[in-house]
Image (tube, rainbow, N blue to C red):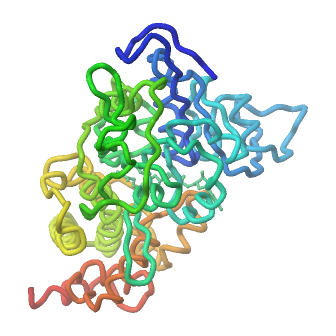
Amino acid sequence: MTIANGNGNGHGPAQRKHKVTVVGSGNWGTTVAKLVAESTREHPDVFEEDVQMWVYEEKVTIPKDSPHYDAAVGEEPQNLTSIINKYHENVKYLPKIALPSNVVANPSLQDAVKDATVLVFNFPHDFIHSILKQMKGHILPYARGISCIKGVTVDDDKIELICEHIGDTLGIYCGALSGANIASEIANEEWCETTIAYNTPPCDIRSTNGASNGNGTSNGNGEHKDSRGQISKTKLVPLPQEYPPLDHEEFHKLFSRPYFTVSMVSDVVGVSLGGALKNIVAIACGFVEGHGWNMTAKTAVMRRGMLEIIAFAREFFPETINEKTLWEESAGWGDMIVSCTAARNWRYSKMAVERGVSVQEIERTELNGQKLQGISTSREVSSFLRSKGLEEHYPLFKAVELILDQKIKVEEIPHLFRRQ
Ligand SMILES: NC(=O)C1=CN([C@@H]2O[C@H](COP(=O)(O)OP(=O)(O)OC[C@H]3O[C@@H](n4cnc5c(N)ncnc54)[C@H](O)[C@@H]3O)[C@@H](O)[C@H]2O)C=CC1
Ligand SMILES: O=C(CO)COP(=O)(O)O
């Protein structure tokens, strides 16, 4: 147990510090581990300095021309975790970026999350079920999460936000971080913005004398509202008093950097759906550009894509969506613009059309293990809409699935809108 001296947060004379673990270590996972580790160093009163980063272990070869090439090891494949901890660089997923030495790569998921009060989820959503299954029962019951994952989970005719799926599966509260964020640019400390949606659970809200509502007041029963505005079936364990609170102020401290401007909001639906669904639109933009059409066609795709995102949010989360998020926050139009002009889903679907191969083939051959979230999100959203008999209401989402399956050609996209 780590005790922090002083009452930096005004909540008692001695406190435990928050241990932060980043679950995932891809392109964005490693970037977020870097920025969070810089913040934990800057706020030693609130956070333990070391940040655990869980790494899905794999063997990696360091080529001869790399500054990390070790003649004694030669081109023998090494564990990625050992490379990260020795050279402070994720040579596979975030090459040429120096990581702070307090990012500690850990191949054991259960060991990495043990005792963490703050869990940052950051891996391709394709792996969510197996990762959560391994974590279940191995985390603190009062841990809190932030999901940086862009996607949704679909089970037949049910759709869940990723952050809520995480929260319900693990029995904790989990917010969402999303924005116009290209990992390599942020890792290079080029300025950008993001949005974090977090609704401090009532049981964690402390009165001015530092007492939490978890101690016997009406909000102390662990109830909180879900993303549809109903009382969640997940009952929360309150964050113990000896920890600093976890609310907008602390999450702002943890994620914001001089080069990473964070806007804190409460709308988990807008932040999550904006980030997930724009990946389908980005694929559509790549398709039209790969086909040889230019900005006017891409603008039509972006505009119609945003209308489908708003319609989807209104249709399936009518009680809670705050459309302002999509118009005003980085997680809305900002993310749409960057994703349709500069990010991977756009870039590689454009390449697929130019080369006359499938996007899935390009993902396999060109991405060195990185994932295009738009492919799986398109499939999940389309199957969900089909289960509701509503796919015709979302022609752009439908077109993307049909083109991914090579059932229609890019030039047929405008026909789908003819009567609208
Ligand atoms: N890269 C970016 O610029 C941004 C990504 N995001 C989102 O962040 C999330 C994570 O993306 P990235 O970190 O870029 O991932 P990535 O695209 O770099 O994916 C590679 C990661 O997947 C892991 N992986 C591979 N097979 C696995 C398995 N069987 N089980 C578990 N993990 C496995 C790899 O170890 C590696 O950490 C995604 O939802 C993405 O949409 C959000 C903003 C920016
Ligand atoms: O989410 C992103 C930009 O905000 C990154 O998108 P890609 O996964 O398409 O690179």
- Please say if 328 is above or below 101: below
Task: Farthest residue to the top: give it.
Answer: 6
Specify the farthest residue to the right: 72
Residue at x 62% of width, y 42% of height: 113
Please give the name of the residue rendered at 51% of the width and 32% of the height, measured from the top-left corner: 34
* Quarter of the figure with residue 410: bottom left
Which quadrant of the figure contains the N terminus?
A: top right
Residue 31 at x, y percent in the picture:
49, 38
In the rendered picture of this protein, how many numbered marks are placed on residues? 0
Which quadrant is home to the C terminus?
bottom left
- Which residue appears at 34% of the width and 73% of the height? 287
Q: Residue at left 56%, top 41%?
A: 94
Does residue 16 appear to the left or right of 247 in the view shown?
A: right
Query: Is 102 displayed left or right of 212 in the figure?
Result: right
Residue 274 location, x and y as percent? Answer: 27, 59
Whether residue 196 is visible = no
- 367 w.r.t. 13: above or below: below
The residue closer to the viewer here, 50 or 393, is 50
Is 188 rendered above or below residue 344? above
Q: Position of residue 392 (x, y in %)?
A: 23, 89
Residue 412 location, quadrant = bottom left
Where in the figure is residue 16, as x and y percent of width and height? 53, 21
Residue 258 visible to an observer of this rendering: yes
| 126 sits left or right of 162 in the view | right
Q: Residue furthest left?
A: 420
